[in-house]
Structures are given as C-alpha cells and as structure tokens.
Image (tube, rainbow, N blue to C red):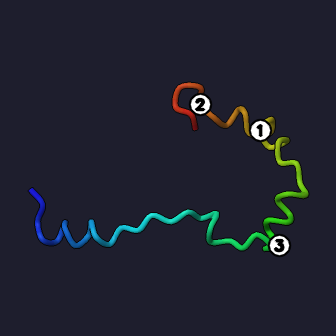
Amino acid sequence: MITEQNEKARKQIEFVCTDDLVPQDHLLRIIDKAIDWSFIYDLVRDKYSPDQGR
C-alpha cells in the first residue's frame, strides 16, 4: 500500500547521469584521458573477493 508520504518520496526521486554533470572540457576529464588507469586493476586485484565481487 502506498501511503501519502511514500508517494511524495517516490515523486522526488530524480535519475541523473553524472557524466552529464561534468563539462567535456573539465580538467578532470582531460586528466582522465591522459592517464592509462589500467595499472590499478593489478594493484587492487587481491582486495576483491571472488565470491562477493568486492
């Protein structure tokens, strides 16, 4: 059963794409494109559980 409070909360939810919030020419996007981040996977591989995914 949807109460009035639940209905108000449901209407307040907004889906946002964080990619749309950061301008394409933002410094962090430039840095992200300049650095090959793939090395991180090897550094953190043992931090993740094969069963839990974290």
Dot 2 amino acid type: Ser
Secondary-structure class at tag 3 = helix
Which label was assigned to residue 49?
2
Mark 1 or 3, nearer chain start: 3
User: Residue 14, position in %: x, y?
Assistant: 41, 68
Tag 1 secondary structure: helix
Quarter of the image holding residue 6? bottom left
Q: In the depicted view, which residue is nearer to us: 50 or 19?
A: 19
Tag 1: amino acid = Tyr
Split into 4 quadrants, where in the image is the C terminus?
Answer: top right
Image location of residue 13, percent across then percent down: 36, 67
Q: Residue at x 28, y 70 (%)?
A: 11
- Residue occupying the point 85% across, 66% down: 30
Quarter holding the N terminus?
Answer: bottom left
Looking at the image, the residue that sits furthest to the top is: 51
* In this picture, residue 9 sits left or right of residue 50: left
Q: As shown in the figure, which amino acid type bears the numbered disc 3?
A: Leu
The residue where tag 3 is placed is 27
Which is more foreground, mark 1 or mark 3? 3
Instruction: Name the residue located 59 percent from the left edge and 65 percent from the top edge.
Output: 18
Sequence order check, earlier mark of 2 and 3: 3
